Image: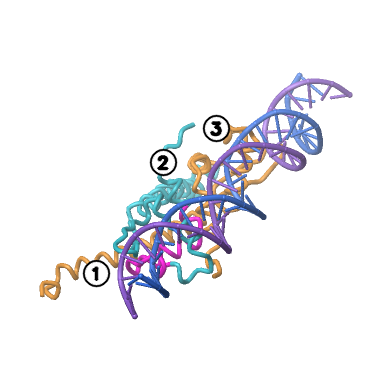
Chain colours: A orange, B cyan, C purple, D blue
Amino acid sequence: MVNQQPQLDSVFHALADPTRRAVIGRLLQGAAPVTTLSQPFAMGLPAFLKHLAVLEAAGLIRSEKQGRVRTCRVDAARLAAAEAWLAEQRALWQGRTDRLAAFVESPAAQE
Amino acid sequence: MVNQQPQLDSVFHALADPTRRAVIGRLLQGAAPVTTLSQPFAMGLPAFLKHLAVLEAAGLIRSEKQGRVRTCRVDAARLAAAEAWLAEQRALWQGRTDRLAAFVESPAAQE
DNA sequence: CTGTTGGTTCACCATATGGCGAACTATATA
DNA sequence: TATATAGTTCGCCATATGGTGAACCAACAG
């Protein structure tokens, strides 16, 4: 079987870590350089850079370097893609339970 | 630093795999026993059971056994939690870009 | 030029993940 | 009772993940 949505793999994987989610939350308040972003976390810079690499590989953030400081910012497109998938699944689920509820409450179900 | 939303960890991790997302998609069409669920996939039953275990640990599915067949069904609550987190982030992002757009278009930005 | 700062790279380690095959249990069914 | 079926468990393996410390490069600052 082939993977139909390889983007979702990397996006969900990137989101499955509290450090990375926190980075996104922080970046929503505005762009920031690497060291500033790393401050709240107990780990070393190499480990933190790996997290940033995961986020960037997933397309959730972008970054560019000028001088010796690399500035990161969020890119919400992939975030929206993940949300869209979830919304679609929920729609299916709700449609199903709605129909189920309708059936249970329908006269036909009473026979 | 402590993990504030351990549920999101497991939910996003569970969703970061095409096999597991496909299982959810399949289960949205209705409950099904383990072997039926495993049919579309090339892997063996032991490997597939691990995927089901991941989904169940994340609270995305529930299952119960009667006789020798275990029937699985989705539990959409955690799915909704993941969607809620994403929606919240997007709201922050949109609020920010909206304000940014407003600023760019404002007279003050022209000075 | 020298030192410091921001970031990067490297080698390494422990654990988790995702797969396998083989053996096993328990429930139908003939 | 014998046999097939549904699922489970076990030991094993390769690779991925998340962290470390140490060395390193590039750009400011003095």
State which chain disc 1 sits on.
A
Q: CA distance from mark 2 to mark 1?
A: 33 Å
Q: Is residue C25 above or below residue C13?
A: below
Are there few (<14), some (14-19), or many (20+) residues within 10 Å of tag 1?
few
Q: How far from the left and from the top, in percent, is residue B69?
A: 34, 65
Residue assigned mark 1? A99
Determine the secondary structure under disc 2.
loop
Residue B5 is labelled as 2
Q: Is residue B26 magenta?
A: yes
Residue C12: x %, y % from top left: 72, 38
Q: Main secondary structure of the magenta part?
A: helix
**In the rendered structure, which segment of residues is drawn in magenta?**
B14-37
Q: Is residue B7 left or right of residue A58?
A: left
As helix, strand or loop, the secondary structure at mark 3 comes to loop
Comparing A26 with C13, the one in front is C13
Residue B57 pos. (x, y %) = 40, 50
Tag shown at residue A41: 3
